[in-house]
Image: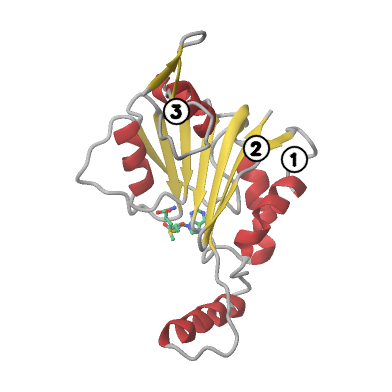
Amino acid sequence: MTIDDDDQRVFHNEKSSTYWFPKDEDEQQRLTGNYMRDFKKGVSVLDVGCSSGIWIMDMITDYPNCTYHGCDIVDTTNKVLKLNQFTFSYANVITGLPYPENTFDFVNLRFFIFALREEEWPRVIKEIIRVTKPGGMLQLTESDITLEEGISSVYHSVKRAVFTACKSRGQNPQIARELEKLVLENNNNDRFEYKYIKKICVGLYRSIVTLV
Ligand SMILES: C[S@@+](CC[C@H](N)C(=O)[O-])C[C@H]1O[C@@H](n2cnc3c(N)ncnc32)[C@H](O)[C@@H]1O
């Protein structure tokens, strides 16, 4: 470990590497986003389409000081675990969420690719922006289905079948690629200014959007 005496920043000492940024806690905060600091203090979090509540359970393990709300069209939440900081509500995100405007610091929407018709996405994005506080964040995570031509494996046949099933339901199996555009086009008449978006693509697209 190497410490820069002037400002006490900590750097790696791997001689073969030219990497010159610090590796200390401040740097991890910078890379991860300052909101992690707020999560430790406690913020209000909504998981739309929470299903069993698995994402919330993971979050509670890491950030027990936050307040968690989850909603879904069915209640399949885990009834064995009693989580004090978690409240479930029935809700259909297409017709509207049962929360006032500007309620949550962080809103998570994950794996709706097989839940929404293509034309329903703009309404849903508007609705989750509505319930997010100014300065809050949205996290959108969707898988992506890419079709490679001319490959005849079972895996590719299954992908083609899923692609066709989505299309027959009016769903877009490649909606993940549209997330950034959807947020930009549906930000409630510029009530929020779009500030930052991050995309990670490993068969999965994730956008983290900060609203001001
Ligand atoms: C594939 S599961 C994903 C569950 C969870 N978000 C996760 O990432 O583990 C999709 C969930 O969305 C819910 N869902 C589908 N359509 C919905 C809607 N219009 N409004 C709210 N929830 C919905 C389903 O009931 C299901 O629990």
Q: What whole-number distance in Å separates the C-alpha atoms at marks 3 and 2?
A: 37 Å
Any mark on residue 23, and which?
3
Residue receiving disc 1: 188
Pointers 3 and 2 in contact (CB under 8 A)?
A: no
Q: Which amino acid does label 3 sit on?
A: Lys
Could one spot residue 33 in this view of the protein? no
Q: Find residue 165 and report its horizontal and vertical position in percent.
A: 54, 80
Q: What residue type is labelled 1?
A: Asn
Please say if 82 is above or below 36: below
Q: As rendered, which of 85 and 212 lies closer to the eye?
A: 212
Q: What whole-number distance in Å separates the C-alpha atoms at marks 1 and 3?
A: 39 Å
Residue receiving disc 2: 130
Q: Is residue 18 left or right of residue 78?
A: right
Pointers 2 and 1 in contact (CB under 8 A)?
A: yes
Q: How crowded is mark 3: few (under 14 residues within 10 Å), some or many (20 or more)?
A: some
- Badge nearest the viewer, 1 or 3: 3
SS under mark 3? loop
Q: In this view, does 54 lie to the left or right of 7?
A: left
